[in-house]
Image (cartoon, helix red, strand yellow):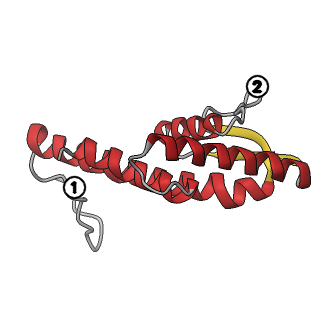
C-alpha cells in the first residue's frame, strides 16, 4: 500500500470516528453519518446561537483542510479585508465547534502533517542529500575563519 493510500485510509478512519459511521468503507453509511452531523449542527444552532470564531492556521495545508471541512458541514469560512491569509473565520454554534469541527480538524490535520513531513524528508534524502538532521549546538561562538 502506497503512503498516499495509507494516508487516505487513515483520513477515512478518522472521519468515520468523528461522524459515527459504522464502517469507513461504506459510502452510504458515511453519507448518513454526515447527514447526522449536519442535523446535529442544525439542532445545536437552534439551542446554541452561532458565534463568530476566528482561527489562525499555521500553514496553507491546515487552512485548506479547515476550510474544506467547514464547507462539508455547510459552514461558510471567510476572512475580513486586511486579515492575514492564515486567518479563517466561521459562524457556528460553539458546541459544534468544540465537539465536532475542531476535534476532527485536529486529528485530520495531524495525519496530514505527518504524511507531508514523511514525504518531504524522503524527497530530501533521495534527491538532495541523505543527512537532513538539525544543526548541532555549539557551546560558544566559533572563532572567525
Q: Secondary structure at mark 2?
A: loop
Dots 2, 1 in contact, CB < 8 A: no
For the point 65% across and 43% down, the residue is 35
Kindly give the residue lying farthest to the bottom in the view shown: 139
Please tell me how crowded label 2 is: few (under 14), some (14-19), or many (20+) other residues with Cα within 10 Å: few
On the rendered structure, is 43 left or right of 72? right
- Residue situated in front as seen by the camera: 8 or 60: 8
Q: Quadrant of residue 143?
A: bottom left
For the point 22% across and 46% down, the residue is 3
Camera-near label (2 vs 1) is: 2
For the point 90% across and 55% down, the residue is 47
On the rendered structure, is 105 left or right of 91? left
Residue 64: x %, y % from top left: 53, 35
On the rendered structure, is 11 left or right of 104? left
Residue 4: x %, y % from top left: 26, 42
Q: Quadrant of residue 88?
A: top right
Residue that label 2 marks:
81
Residue 21: x %, y % from top left: 52, 54
Q: Is residue 35 above or below residue 24?
A: above
Gap between marks 2 and 1 measured at Cα: 48 Å
Please tell me how crowded label 1 is: few (under 14), some (14-19), or many (20+) other residues with Cα within 10 Å: few
For the point 21% across and 55% down, the residue is 144
Q: Is residue 144 above or below residue 128?
A: below
Residue that label 1 marks:
144
Residue 80: x %, y % from top left: 77, 29
Q: Secondary structure at mark 1?
A: loop
Q: Say whether disc 2 or disc 1 marks the residue closer to the N-terminus.
A: 2
Amino acid at each position: 500500500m502506497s503512503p498516499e493510500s495509507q494516508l487516505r485510509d487513515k483520513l477515512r478512519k478518522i472521519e468515520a470516528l468523528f461522524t459515527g459511521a459504522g464502517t469507513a468503507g461504506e459510502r452510504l453509511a458515511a453519507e448518513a453519518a454526515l447527514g447526522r452531523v449536519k442535523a446535529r449542527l442544525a439542532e445545536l444552532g437552534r439551542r446554541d446561537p452561532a458565534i463568530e470564531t476566528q482561527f489562525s492556521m499555521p500553514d496553507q495545508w491546515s487552512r485548506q483542510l479547515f476550510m474544506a471541512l467547514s464547507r462539508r458541514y455547510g459552514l461558510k469560512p471567510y476572512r475580513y479585508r486586511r486579515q492575514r491569509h492564515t486567518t479563517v473565520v466561521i459562524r457556528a454554534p460553539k458546541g459544534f465547534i468544540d465537539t465536532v469541527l475542531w476535534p476532527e480538524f485536529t486529528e485530520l490535520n495531524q495525519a496530514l502533517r505527518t504524511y507531508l513531513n514523511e514525504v518531504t524528508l524522503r524527497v530530501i534524502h533521495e534527491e538532495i542529500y541523505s543527512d537532513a538532521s538539525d544543526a548541532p549546538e555549539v557551546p560558544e561562538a566559533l572563532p572567525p575563519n
